[in-house]
Image (tube, grey):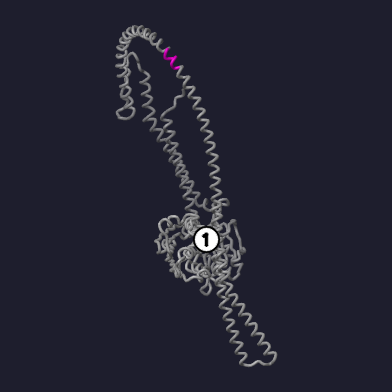
Amino acid sequence: MKVTSISRKLLTRVLSVYFILTVSVTGIQIVAEYFNTKSHINSELLTLQKTISGSLTRAVWELNTQQAIDISEGLIAIPMIKGITVTDEANNTITQLGEVISVEPQISYPHEENNDTYLANEHQSINSLSEGLFGHSFPLIFEFSGRTTTVGTVTLLSSNDVIFSRIEVGIYFLIGNAMVKTAFLVFLFSLAFTKLLTEPLTELTEQIKQLDLHDPEASKLHTLNDEKNELNILEDAYNHLIDELVDFKDKLALSKRELNSTNEKLDDQNLMLEQEVAKKTSSLSSTMLKMEVQQKELLQQKHQLQAENNRRCKTETTLINTNKDLKSSIIQLSKAQDRLLEAEKMASLGALSAEISHEINTPIGVSITSISYLSDILAKLQLDISGQRLSRRSIEGFIANAQQSVNLLLSNLNRASELIASFKQVAVDQTNDKIRLIDVGKYFDEIIQSLHPKLKKTNHTIKIHCDKHIEIYSHPGAIAQIIINLILNSIIHGFEFINRGEIIIDISLDNQRLHIDYQDNGVGMNEEQLSKLLEPFYTTKGENGGTGLGTYIIKNLVVDTLNGNIKITSTPDKGLFYHIDFPDMRYT
């Protein structure tokens, strides 16, 4: 078997770790020097940009292409600059010298008519690992009469070759320093391991080889050195082992004599044991017969258990198939529920459409009557002019009647336009799940306006308390559906026996959450009715066509669509109170 030197193996591992550490540290220093030098070059590019920005901007503004080219040629002569590109405000290249990088600078240019919207960055860093280029692209901004205009861009590029040329000497120094330190450390460790480990171990090995088993006392190790180290501990352990070996030889001789005596006694015991075995063999035969009988009974029980197991497997298969059928039924029920919810939403929108259509007929009818009357008096005026019967009095009468008709026409058409606009916004939002910015106060007014045809048939009032500056990002259709359902529920159920009902809606914004407190003074609900209010298909108007999905839709819209919470309290004869809160979705 090949002998491996411990000192050489230990030295190899130590120096390997040191070599890896040295290479790693040297590599990190080189990388750090690279990035530090690159940072300095970037700073120099930015400083150079500030130096040439004014003259280059004026040259581009004045369409002095030759001056822009001269400036670019002067810049490309600088060793640090490897490429320069100057473009006008239409991104057309004025001059392009040296290296070119295929990067579109993400700089937005303002229109001259609106400098307040200037959002361009001062500069954009550019890096291309594949081409070894980097630099900056910045806008050329011309100031004129207190206004700023972006007239073009300039891109300055440098390369990794510039970096390496600057750090080349430093790299050679770092590598040479690492090699010198490594060579010195190899020599130092080799000398130390030879003196402190290899030579003492060799001397110790030679003394151990001289061991005499017949006279162990003469084979004890002598002191190798005066230091107290691991070799001295090994020497003491070896000498202690020699002492124990001498004691063991004495005990072994004594044990041998005792063993001979024990063997004689063991022979006597063997005779007695053979006799006892013969007796036990006869009783064991009878026991084996009993065990065969029990084995037959176990086999019968095993067959019974297999039959029972087969029966349970069939039952399990039946249960699995039944479970699959149940899952399919649940999926179908869920789809049916979604269709019912959508139908309820469209039914609500359809009823609202019918009310709006009926309400619009009135101002449109008045407008048609006004137009007819205006047509008649125009025809009469034409006859007076044709018959030369036109007088000051007839003209004044025509103007007064025409002005009255026009005013009546304008007021009724504006009324119809407001109704259509309010219904259009609410209807579009209810059929569109997109999130948009909502002016909450104005949007609630539009919702109430769309319900005006329904409300004007009653004596009920709605009061909204809302800060006019509240704006949030959310689902407007969901909010409209919630408020419309709440108001219609109050009118149909809460105010069934009340002539002058009152609805109060308080709206506030706190910690990016919109809080809506809705309260009516209707008949209210008892605890049993309130516990079932949010359940699907629960209604007290089933005989009148109620579906019981109104409050269930409200709950789904608040919890699932708006990611909010809903809490309902009520006292009989004191109305219902809803607290709804949900987050501004721009912060979620």
Give the residue at x 54% y 41%. 322
Up the image or down, 563 lies above or below 152; here it is: above
Left or right of residue 248: residue 412: right
458 or 182, nearer to the observer: 458
Left or right of residue 295: residue 349: right
Q: Residue 478, image x and y in percent?
A: 51, 60
Magenta segment: 286-291
546 or 438, nearer to the observer: 546
Q: Amino acid at mark 1?
A: Asn
Q: Residue 314, image x and y in percent?
A: 54, 34
Up the image or down, 550 lies above or below 423; here it is: above
Task: Report which residue position mark 1 lands on.
Answer: 544
User: Can residue 464 be found in the magenta stretch?
Assistant: no
Give the residue at x 58% y 59%. 104
SS type, badge 1: helix
Secondary structure that dominates the magenta span: helix
What is the quadrant of residue 93 in the picture? bottom right
Q: Is residue 99 visible?
A: no
Left or right of residue 256: residue 385: right
Give the residue at x 58% y 57%. 103
